[in-house]
Image (spheres, rainbow, N blue to C red):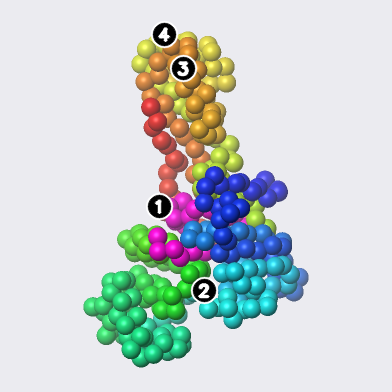
Amino acid sequence: MSSSVMLTSKQGDGPASPAAISAVGLRKSYRDKVVLDGVDLRIPAGSVFALLGPNGAGKTTAVKILSTLVTADAGTVRVGGHDLATDPQAVRAAIGVTGQFSAVDGLITGEENMLLMADLHHLSKTEGRRVTAELLERFDLSDAAKKPAQSYSGGMKRRLDIAMTLVGDPRIIFLDEPTTGLDPRSRHTMWQIIRELVTGGVTVFLTTQYLEEADQLADRIAVLNNGTIAAEGTAEELKRLIPGGHVRLRFSDPDAYRSATLALHESTRDDDSLALQIPSDGSQRELRSLLDWLDATGIEADELTVHTPDLDDVFFALTAGADTPGRPSPSSRPDQSEENVR
């Protein structure tokens, strides 16, 4: 797919929904290397937005621009209702950033890291200690609060990193590959933390190379490739972009199987299993049409299974030819989605 595909979500991000982050025509180059080439984004408040892309696609550059760390060459950006170009200080007051690499100082304790952040946010000593104690408790770090942060596990350091980000009570948080290098248990703990943040009204801008992570967390996903948004939508919408989806009908009655085979000309037969595979995008409209047809003809299928491409298929199709040396190992990939609906 050479052109950008924009898919409209059916809920939560309509015109009336306020945007926590919006960008129009975002551009950035480093000498002769174009990193972002006219990127448009609109991220509703209180949602998780995931930006996917191969190494070098520009994900981190986008985060740095939106969080005021790097200046864009062109484009209009509003974050938290503030214009990035004219009021960057107000943007900084509204956001928190957790980068790819931990900001934790390993030579001081977890509590001291938190108190340092409280000082940077100009909290009083009393308020700083209250916020520190609450966040350390919230992130299950109270028992390790007095220990040097360099003794923490990777998952503990990442939790401390996010706790430090929350000291200023930001309503928008940028998480740049927050679970890279974490074991599966720590990654799932981090997912739960992100879900709890969003439940509390926080907007999360997430970059990740773990496609299951985006599938699990994101309300909307954009795939960045060669400096542009190749496609954007919900996980299910993106999966329907990729060919290979189908509905599988399985029969126990050979006569019903033969009748369905004669009527459904585009289906692929599996005579040994008495099953038919019918090309489908898995949409509600197509499923309803098929079920209505089965009811109208009196043909009884014992099982109907929807098979859809997963986000790995979407990612590889949209970034074909891109260098993806950092993509997760096969063990971290979800299986192709299958859903029994009857």
219 is within the stretch colored magenta: yes
Circle 1 is placed at which residue position? 331
Q: Nearer the viewer, mark 2 or mark 3?
A: 2
Q: Residue furthest left?
A: 143
Specify few, some or many for label 4: CA neighbours under 10 Å numbering under 14, 14-19, or 20 or more. few
Looking at the image, which is closer to me, 27 or 269?
Answer: 27
Circle 2 is placed at which residue position? 95
Specify few, some or many for label 1: CA neighbours under 10 Å numbering under 14, 14-19, or 20 or more. few
Q: Are marks 1 and 2 in contact (CB under 8 Å)?
A: no
Which structural element holds mark 2?
strand
Between the C-alphas of marks 4 and 2, the distance is: 63 Å
Counting residues from the start of the chain, the first of labels 4 and 2 encountered is 2
Circle 3 is placed at which residue position? 294
Counting residues from the start of the chain, the first of labels 3 and 1 encountered is 3
Between the C-alphas of marks 4 and 3, the distance is: 14 Å
Query: Which x, y percent locates residue 253?
Result: 37, 12
Between the C-alphas of marks 2 and 3, the distance is: 53 Å
Q: Is residue 31 left or right of residue 212?
A: right
The image shows residue 177, relative to residue 298, as above or below, that is: below
Q: Which amino acid type is shown beneath numbered disc 1?
A: Ser
Q: Which amino acid type is shown beneath numbered disc 4?
A: Asp
The magenta-colored residue range is 199-224
The image shows residue 265, relative to residue 159, as above or below, that is: above
Query: Which x, y percent locates residue 179?
Result: 42, 65
